């Protein structure tokens, strides 16, 4: 049940959550030029993926990368956390597939909350551009960092929201 849209409208899906304001405040700062969060994201070195503690139970993976060819990407999902992915700068293709349709490759849930899967060609493709938000739930395997038209620098943050915090 992936959800894709623009910030901040997409966070209306989280309005029933007492945690929505924490996410909204962090993402607003990430997208607003000149804020501490936006500056920190832009100052990352290429191919950096850093954990940033937001609040009790929440963290973000702040990242800067060059988009790459599909064969250099992998498909993954998470069990303990919902991914709220926001593109700050750049664009990428993200492929999404339903996890029961995939063949598990590696289970790293205990150490990294990460499941990886063997390649799968029956996916849905999403173009994530600056200001776009994609929300992935445990059943949404996703393969990001892919080139859209040409390789570009991407600045992105992924808020990790515990599944137990979410309710519609």
Image: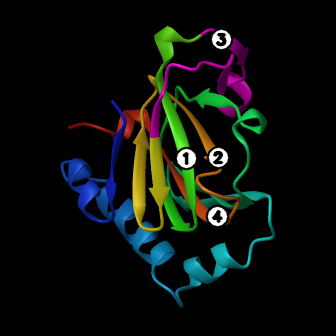
Task: Determine which of the numbered discs, if any, sits on residue 93 in the image.
Answer: 1
In space, the residues marked 3 and 2 are separated at their CA atoms by 21 Å
Q: Pointer 1 and pointer 2: residues touching (CB < 8 Å)?
A: yes
Residue 17 visible, this orientation: no
Q: Position of residue 8 (x, y in %)?
A: 29, 65
- Residue at point 73%, 29% (across, down): 111
Q: Pointer 4 and pointer 2: residues touching (CB < 8 Å)?
A: no
Q: Indicate which disc, 3 or 4, sits on the residue closer to the N terminus.
A: 3
Q: Quadrant of residue 11?
A: bottom left
In space, the residues marked 1 and 2 are separated at their CA atoms by 5 Å
Name the element at disc 4.
strand
According to the picture, the residue beneath numbered tag 4 turns out to be 154
Q: Indicate which disc, 1 or 4, sits on the residue closer to the N terminus.
A: 1
In space, the residues marked 3 and 4 are separated at their CA atoms by 28 Å
In space, the residues marked 1 and 4 are separated at their CA atoms by 11 Å
The local crowd at label 3, few if under 14, some if 14 to 19, many if 20 or more residues have their Cα within 10 Å, is some
In the image, farthest residue toward the bottom:
34
Name the element at disc 2.
strand
According to the picture, the residue beneath numbered tag 2 turns out to be 146
Observer-nearest of 97 and 16: 97
Q: Which residues are magenta?
A: 103-125
Q: Is residue 90 magenta?
A: no
The local crowd at label 2, few if under 14, some if 14 to 19, many if 20 or more residues have their Cα within 10 Å, is many
The local crowd at label 1, few if under 14, some if 14 to 19, many if 20 or more residues have their Cα within 10 Å, is many
- Residue at point 33%, 64% (across, down): 7
């Amino acid at each position: 049940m992936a959800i894709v849209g623009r910030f901040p409208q997409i966070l209306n899906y989280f309005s029933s959550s007492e945690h929505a304001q924490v996410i909204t405040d962090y993402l607003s700062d990430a997208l607003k030029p000149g804020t501490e969060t936006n500056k920190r994201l832009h100052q990352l070195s290429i191919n950096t993926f850093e954990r940033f503690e937001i609040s009790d139970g929440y963290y973000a993976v702040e990242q800067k990368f060059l988009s790459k060819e599909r064969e250099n990407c992998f498909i993954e999902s998470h069990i303990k956390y919902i991914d709220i992915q926001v593109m700050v700068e750049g664009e990428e293709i993200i492929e999404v597939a339903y996890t029961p349709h995939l063949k598990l490759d590696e289970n790293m849930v205990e150490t990294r909350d990460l499941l990886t899967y063997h390649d799968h060609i029956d996916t849905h493709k999403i173009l994530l551009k600056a200001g776009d938000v994609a929300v992935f739930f445990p059943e949404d395997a996703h393969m990001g960092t892919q080139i859209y038209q040409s390789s570009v620098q991407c600045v992105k943050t992924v808020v990790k929201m515990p599944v137990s915090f979410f309710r519609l």
